[in-house]
Image (cartoon, rainbow, N blue to C red):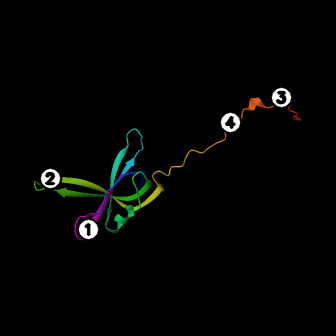
Amino acid sequence: MDIKGKIHEISPIMNVTETFKKRELIIEYAENPSYPEYIKFEALQDKVNLFDNLKTGDQVEVFFNLRGRPWTDRNGKTAYFNTLVVWRINTLSAAGNESPAPEYAPPADLNSAPQDDDLPF
């Protein structure tokens, strides 16, 4: 699966145990710009380095796997959790590097052409 959006936040690397580390990435997904969604992704183990060169505000395309798992509490009630695990990320445009508006010559005034125009047609 993949999604395109703007980086809202990047967490530092979290060492959950001596052998397990993860890092979180929050993407602002604005399918409807009036109501943007903030979606949390995780990178695990060697993939935590995928976020090293990213900055808040970068436009990115995130490739991820959807994972789900049950958890049963002491009372026997089961809850379900979903995780979006990143396996690749592409920077589409860096923050602050949006293309500036192109500069055009001012429009020509077509009404100011000489009246003694000697065109053959």
Element type at marker 1? Answer: loop
The label shown at residue 20 is 1
Label 3 or label 2, whichever lies nearer to me, is 3
Look at mark 4 in the image and give the residue it sits on.
107
The magenta segment is 14-26
Q: Which mark is residue 85?
A: none
Distance CA(mark 4)–CA(mark 1): 62 Å
Instruction: Give the residue at mark 2.
Output: 77
Q: Secondary structure at mark 3?
A: loop
Residues marked 3 and 1 touching at CB (< 8 Å): no
Q: Amino acid at mark 3?
A: Gln
Q: CA distance from mark 1 to mark 2?
A: 27 Å
Quarter holding residue 116: top right
The residues bearing labels 3 and 4 have C-alpha atoms spaced at a distance of 20 Å
Rendering coords of residue 22 (x, y %): 29, 63
Residue 80 in the image: state x and y as whole percent: 23, 54
Residue 115's disc is 3
Of helix, strand and loop, which one carries label 2? loop
User: Distance of mark 4 from mark 2, alpha carbons?
Assistant: 71 Å
Q: Amino acid at mark 2?
A: Lys
Q: Amino acid at mark 1?
A: Phe
Between disc 4 and disc 1, the foreground one is 4
Above or below 102: residue 93: below
What residue do we see at 22% from left, 57% from top?
70
69 with respect to 59 (left or right): left
Q: Nearer the viewer, mark 3 or mark 1?
A: 3
- Please state, as top left, top right, bottom left or bottom right, where the C terminus lies in the image: top right
